Image: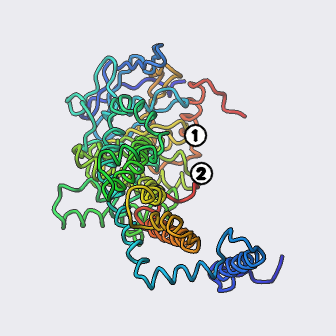
Amino acid sequence: MASLETIPSRASIATKLSVDNVEMVFDRDGSEMRVLDNINLEIGEGEFICLLGPSGCGKSTLLSAMGGFLAPTHGQIRIDGEAVQGPDPRRIFVFQERGVFPWLTVEGNIGFGLFKLPRAERERRIAHYIQMVGLTGFEKTYPAELSGGMKQRLEVARALAVNPDLLLLDEPFGALDSITRLIMRRELLRIWQAERKTIVFVTHDIDEAVQLADRVVVMSARPARIQQIVDIDIEHPRDLSSPRYLELRDGIFQQIGLAHQI
Amino acid sequence: MRKVPRHSANHWSVRLGPVLFILLLLAAWQFAVSRQPAHLLPGPIGTAEGIGDLISHGLLFKYVVASLFRVTWGFVLAAVLAIPLGLAIGWYRRAELAFNPLLQILRPISPLAWIPVAILWFGVGDAASIFLIFIGCFLPLLLTAINAVQSVPAVYVNAGRNFGLSTPALLSRVLLPAVLPQLIIGLRITLGVAWLVVVAAEMIAVNSGLGFLIVDARNAGNRYDLVVAGMVLIGIIGLLLDISMRSFENVKSLRWGYAEEG
């Protein structure tokens, strides 16, 4: 498979995030459980990276470590050359839609992280992102009255409103139906192209990874190692029936050890 | 498919149902009492006359106010102390481990078991009955607050930290709104407990209030019409207290906590 060469980080792009020899060992009922094993990864400024792997492999653990919610047992994660010490508004972690605050309206959620801004600027940003994610008319609505897709867009808007340089998305569309999921991918790509954030996106869906990412980081089952990094060299908007798309997708299927047949 | 329109819950005939049923029960009660020559229980008419007696002697208002006064003090003192303490214990896992055995031992002790202690410490009077109500409310509220904090999904706390909230801000902007629906349920149940305890406390420690009315009516001349009148008043006021607490569950920023799953 010529298309599945490991692509090292590209020298032309400034490094945004680097993962150096990261190991994660959890203590479960007295026995050690190795979740991440010697992970090395460099992510460039403005890059869209998908971490792809089977459920429970540890890819979300890696994402949590990037977000500063978990400290690696060994190794280091650096963002802009600076070691990650804890959560920081410059990098926002987007949970599945569960992360929106149910006691706040759409406006209240989007404005949640903007408490340091003057009122006028805060309101301008809230209005801007409500419009960007298509929630106009729902400003005063509580999340319980929104659909799953709307809640997901709300959470993305809340993250974007604080103007982070890095978005960490943990299977954000996993709970949505397949049609909404496709729409959300298109929306996310549109937002990414407009705002040029660096995005790390965790998924177990091969199609999703190949549709979205600049590079797909294929991870093994636990303890997770990086098995392969696949460069998706297709321009957006991507034609999902083009030979190149199918070739890349099938290559990853084989890499993971699944024949592309049911 | 039936074409007959079903009455909505607000239709007058549906709302009248419970009223008619109560009237029917009152009629049955009156009938049963009239067939029974020995005065085992006054009938509804006798009870109504008893309430009329209380009004004409100016005792009804005085006793109701006396009972509500004690309940308010005991309940508010317990809430003001137990809720912040419970939130703190729930927030710090070690505090919970330290306090839990003590709480589990104190919990099965009926507040009524404290009556001798209350009289020893406070003598006969308002303070003793307020203390008993306080005892009856404090532990349930403390446990409610501890459990409420521990059931807050980690995703809310992590999201709050991610947006750069300081610990005080995290407590007031994330933790408090997240626990409020459960706290209000706890307050509602506890107010019911307080209303149960005040009656018992007034039977022993004071000479006013609805509990005193019941004991006094029996001791001072076997006025069982006043005993039952006191019971009816206790029931009606308890119901009104519960309805007023329940109205919080319709507040929009709290309603998410009471919605059914899905």
Q: How dense is the environment of label 2, judged by Cα within 10 Å: few (below 14), some, or many (20 and up)? A: few
Residue A150 is at least partly visible in this image: no
Please give the residue where the numbered disc 1 appears in the rendered image. Answer: A243
Foreground residue, B154 or A120? B154
Up the image or down, B257 lies above or below B96; here it is below
The image position of residue A253, as x and y in percent, is 59, 30
Please give the residue where the numbered disc 2 appears in the rendered image. Answer: A178
The image position of residue B12, as x and y in percent, is 65, 86
Query: Residue pushed farthest front?
Result: B221
Residue drawn at x 43%, y 55% is B204
Query: Residue pushed farthest left?
Result: A118
Where residue A65 sits, quadrant-wise, is top left
Cα separation between marks 1 and 2 = 23 Å
Local secondary structure at mark 1: helix
The image position of residue B74, as x and y in percent, is 34, 56
* Amino acid at pointer 2: Ser
| First of labels 1, 2 by sequence position | 2
**Image mark 1: chain:** A
Residue drawn at x 40%, y 57% is A154
Query: Residue pushed farthest right?
Result: B1
From the viewer's perspective, tell me whether residue B73 is left or right of residue B242. Answer: left
Residue drawn at x 71%, y 79% is B30
From the viewer's perspective, tell me whether residue A174 is left or right of residue A101. Answer: right
Foreground residue, A22 or A188? A22
Q: How is the image coloured?
A: rainbow
Up the image or down, A7 lies above or below B25; here it is above
The quadrant the N terminus of chain A occupies is top right
**Image mark 2: chain:** A
* Amino acid at pointer 1: Pro
Foreground residue, B212 or B6? B212
